[in-house]
Structure formats: structure tokens, C-alpha cells
Image: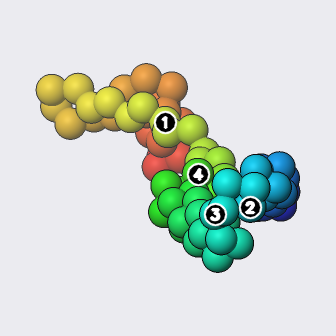
């Protein structure tokens, strides 16, 4: 958020003199800044969520037509049951 805030502040500061020279009130600049920040937040460009935790790999367990587990996982499971 600091980067976005810094950019917004720099832009407002950069146009302030031009706006005032043209007779635009300081309040208009403050409203522009407020609208800009509000739109930025509502766009969720600043959504600061933690990355999802890594999930363990899924083991593909397959059953044959008789309902027996096949493949490497099946061999392990069948041996552990014995």
C-alpha cells in the first residue's frame, strides 16, 4: 500500500500548482485523492492476502471392476492390511 500511496501523493503534488493556477480549489484535489484511493481499494488491486498453504499431492487411487485398489497405492494399502 505504501507504494500506491506514494504514487498518489506524488501525482497530487505534481498537479497541485497547475490546478491552483487554473483556479481549482485545494478541496477538489483532496476529493480526487480520496476517490482515487477508494477506487484502488475497491478494485482489490491491494488485496493483501497470504498465499494459500501448499497442499500435499493427491494419490490417485484406482479401483478395478471388483473394487480392489490397484496401482502403487493399492500395493501399499493391500500390504498394510495383511
Name the disc covering residue 20, or none: 2
Marks 2,3: beta carbons within 8 A: yes
Identified at 38% across, 34% down, the residue is 61
Residue furthest left as drawn:
65
Q: Position of residue 11 (x, y in %)?
A: 77, 50
Q: Give the tally of numbered discs.
A: 4
Which is in the foreground here, disc 3 or disc 4? 3
Q: Position of residue 19 (x, y in %)?
A: 70, 56
SS for dot 4: loop
Kindly indicate the quadrant of the structure image that contains residue 12: bottom right
Residue under circle 3?
A: 24
Which is in the foreground here, disc 4 or disc 2? 2
Q: Residues within 10 Å of mark 3 (few under 14, many from 20)?
A: few
Residue under circle 1?
A: 59
Marks 1,2: beta carbons within 8 A: no
Residue under circle 4?
A: 45
The numbered mark, 1 or 2, whose residue comes first in the sequence reads 2
71 versus 82 height, above or below: above
Amino acid at each position: 500500500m505504501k507504494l500506491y500511496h506514494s504514487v498518489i501523493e506524488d501525482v497530487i503534488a505534481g498537479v497541485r500548482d497547475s490546478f491552483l493556477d487554473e483556479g481549482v480549489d485545494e478541496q477538489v484535489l483532496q476529493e480526487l485523492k480520496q476517490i482515487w484511493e477508494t477506487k484502488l481499494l475497491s478494485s482489490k488491486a491491494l488485496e493483501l492476502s497470504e498465499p494459500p498453504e501448499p497442499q500435499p499431492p493427491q494419490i490417485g487411487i484406482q479401483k478395478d471392476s471388483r473394487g480392489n485398489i490397484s496401482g502403487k497405492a493399492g500395493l501399499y494399502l493391500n500390504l498394510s492390511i495383511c
